[in-house]
Amino acid sequence: MMLNELKQNLEHHLSDVLLDCDCEHDEVTIHIPADAILTVCRKLHDTLGFEQLIDLCGVDYSQYGGSAWETKAASENGFSRAVDGAGNMEPVSEGYRFAVVYHLLSIQHNLRLRIKVRLDADQPIIDSVTSIWNCANWFEREAFDLFGILFDGHDDLRRILTDYGFIGHPFRKDFPLIGNVEMRYDADKKRVIYQPVSIVERTLVPRVIRDDNRYTSSKR
């Protein structure tokens, strides 16, 4: 009943900007446009009692719904579906590729709320909410570092996990899993150097251990 009341309150207070509102898995999720994030978050904080930001993260939907890994049968060649890429969707180069997801908590009402905002593929930018929740500072820096999402109004938007001078954004779906460069200590130069990655990209084949009579020892 509390979730239904929350859903009704959200639909009433945010009727002018609300794109969608659903209730699944004991949590309410609202979808709003990017240009309304500050207005909505301020109203949620001041009026509806969501005083705490639990988490903020980025999402890359470029290969969302791809069927390359869908199967109902075992493969004899390990991860062969990942090798041929059959059924994979093409990366999204336009439209709403990215999203920012906010998780809020209302301590006084014991309620949680999720906000989803879709962002443009070419210029993923959204207003910073650090003026409402100070803890968004590190979360927004993380989303910028890993996804390249820009937060307008952030006082110190710089990388937080990758190294200085790092090129690219590791959590984007088009970023190679093995990376582009690696670092090591050079004993001759007495310093850390960067070089092209030397890891050979390969597909792992899972080891299957069968516990039946075919593989038991014949010695007693």
Image (tube, rainbow, N blue to C red):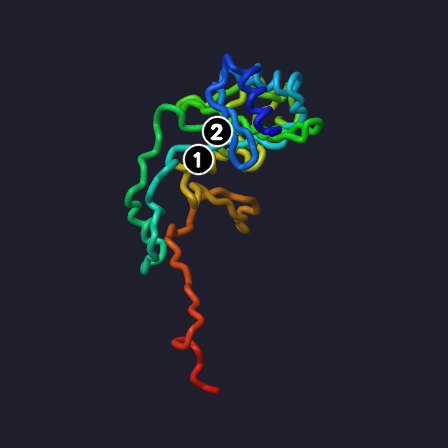
Residue marked by disc 1:
172
- First along the sequence among labels 2 and 1: 2
**Image quadrant in which you'd find residue 85:** top left
Check the picture and name the quadrant holding the N terminus: top right
Disc 1 crowd, CA 10 A, few/some/many (<14, 14-19, 20+): some
Q: Nearer the viewer, residue 120 or 162?
A: 120
Task: Look at the image and tell me whether residue 30 can be seen.
Answer: yes
Question: In percent of the image, x 53 and y 19: which residue is there?
Answer: 11
Q: How much space separates mark 2 and mark 1, taking CA atoms?
A: 8 Å
- Tell me if I can see residue 159 in this picture: no
Q: Judge whether 59 appears above or below 75 on screen.
A: above
**Picture quadrant of residue 68:** top left
12 on left or right of 94 = right
- Residue at the front extreme of this rendering: 1
Residue name at image x 66 percent, y 27 percent: 106
In terms of secondary structure, where does tag 1 sit?
Answer: loop
Which residue, as the protein is rendered here, is positioned at the far top?
16
Q: Residue furthest bottom?
A: 220
Q: Position of residue 90 (x, y in %)?
A: 31, 35
The residue identified by callout 2 is 148
Where is residue 212 shown, x and y percent of the image?
Answer: 42, 73
Within 10 Å of the Cα at label 2, are there few (<14), some (14-19), or many (20+) other Cα atoms?
A: many
* Mark 2 touches mark 1? (CB < 8 Å): yes
Q: In what element is the residue under mark 2?
A: loop
Q: Nearer the viewer, residue 58 or 70?
A: 70
Task: Name the amino acid type tagged 1.
Answer: Arg
Q: Image point 57% across, 30% down: which residue?
A: 56
Viewer-closest of 179 and 25:
25
In the drawing, does residue 189 fall left or right of residue 60? right
Amino acid carrying mark 2 in the image: Gly
* Above or below 197: residue 24: above
Residue 159, given in percent of the width and then of the height, sits at 56, 31
